[in-house]
Image (cartoon, rainbow, N blue to C red):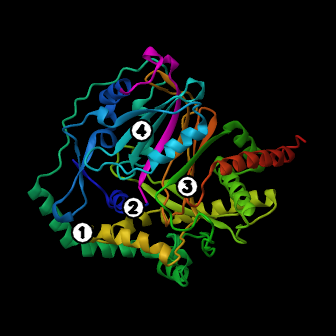
Amino acid sequence: MSQLTTVDATFLHAETGTTHAHIAGLGIVDAGTCPGGRLTVPLVAELVRSRAHLAARPLRQRLVQVPLGLDHPYWEDDPDFAPERHITEIGLPAPGTDRQLADIVAMLHEQPLDRTRPLWEMVLIQGLLGGRTAVYVKVHHAAIDGVMAAETLAALLDLSPEPRDLPADETAPARAPGMAGMLGTGLLKAALHPVRSALSVARTAPYLDEIPGLAAVPGVGLMSSAVQGALRRPGLPRTPRKSAPPTPFNRPIGRRRSVACGELPLDEIKQIRRGLGGSVNDVVMALCATALRKWLDKRGDLPDRPLVAAVPVSLRRRGAAAEPGNQVSIMTTALATHVPDPADRYTAVRQDMDVAKRRFVGSSGNWVREMSGILPAPIAGAATRFALQAAPAISLRPVNLLISNVPGPQFPLYLCGAKVLGYYPISVISDVSGGLNITVFSYDGRVDVGIVACRDLVPDPSEIVDHLVDALDELKGLSREALGEE
């Protein structure tokens, strides 16, 4: 038995008619080595059925609501769990291009998950050029974070076309408490909530300037410094936070989505890192800065100050993948789209990332958990939705967009015998985080790029993918010069 944490519940509360809090991935596989040479619903359903116990929550557990909404929901095993109910199959019309695939994935990503059953679904998309098959997998963020997603993928995938031997399921079905138990626990938590809320406020006060949106409010930085006082770590940067400038993708989002996917060679990104210094993530952020600069400049919308990017960070301790609930926070950083010179822009990105990481370490990133628990459960949902809907009306822009870099395995994986050729993350957008999300996943020598946007604001994000490729060539040239290869 387990219960949603306050962070988990926030992902449920955040959903509106235009915002859905699920995350997804698009795998491209070569199904030629599957039994019968085709990836089918029965084949995948049997795989999920035999391995669901290795990743129980996202695959076979459903939500159980507490009466009167007095507390956050519980998880329990679905007594009617049947993988076939979650897996469907569709075919692309000829010729089955990548653009057609992106349009289908965008339509699938627009649809909310059914909360009456385990919060995931999978769609097998047949008919791609070259005989490939696409696998779109969607899971609600309330059930999973990045590390848990990796664990779930590891449960379903193999290191060779031959499936590995796995232990049988010997766990007893998880059940939520009875009605009386849930009510009793909910009433006790409600009685104690004022104390817990006060403690959360006290723990968060020194780090208010880490919270997107609040950081730009006059006086917040000074108040945070005053509260923390002598506790502030020596040398912790106190640079003022910048507000997010207006962009075309920072307007109220609509219901429709647009999607684009691409790939970059990981060895070339590592070569840039060796030549120009920094980390792989610094290179990824610099590539995004250049691509967004070109996209904005082409439209005459390039701000004269840096964008502000939100970067998800896992708080999950090494070896603690089974720890319940989302263990995730947000780090914000300036993104030097306003710097015209490529070398200076790369240097600025590295410096801004270094400052952001040092500030984040100083606060441990716990403000997300603390802030999500300030309001009691019965009113948290309505308050969260009101805040998200009110943000555009008062022109609140905490950040411009989300950028995430997820490290993955550097060897091939197989699904039901089919080799996984690529895996493109498709994440979340909202009015508060911006109508554009760029997530990259490193896999088997490549960096796979998944971009999702509001179709009303960014109709064709494949243009940003093209700019990323151009940005890579630009940085490769600078790296070769730095290494004396030219």
Q: Amino acid at mark 3?
A: Ala
Q: Residue at x 25, y 60 (%)?
A: 72
99 vs 308: above or below: above
Mark 4, residue position: 151
- Which circle, 4 or 1, is nearer the viewer? 1
The answer to the question of whether label 4 and label 2 lie on touching residues, with beta carbons closer than 8 A, is no
Left or right, 96 with respect to 383, comes to right
The answer to the question of whether label 1 and label 3 lie on touching residues, with beta carbons closer than 8 A, is no
Q: Residue at x 48, y 76 (%)?
A: 393
Q: Residue at x 54, y 84 (%)?
A: 219
Q: Amino acid at mark 2?
A: Gly
Whole-Å distance between the Cαs marked 4 and 1? 32 Å
Whole-Å distance between the Cαs marked 4 and 2? 30 Å
Whole-Å distance between the Cαs marked 3 and 2? 16 Å
Mark 2, residue position: 17
Whole-Å distance between the Cαs marked 1 and 3? 32 Å
Looking at the rendering, in which quadrant would you find the C terminus?
top right
Residue 298: x percent and y percent?
A: 74, 60
Q: Is 158 or 237 nearer to us in this picture? A: 158
- Which circle, 1 or 2, is nearer the viewer? 2
Image quadrant of residue 13?
Answer: bottom left
Q: Secondary structure at mark 1?
A: helix
Residue farthest toward the right in the current orientation of the protein: 486
**Residue 378: numbered disc:** 1
Q: Is 476 or 262 nearer to us in this picture? A: 262
- Report the magenta residues as a range: 19-41
Residue 19: x percent and y percent?
A: 43, 59
Mark 3, residue position: 453
Q: Secondary structure at mark 3?
A: strand
Q: Amino acid at mark 1?
A: Pro
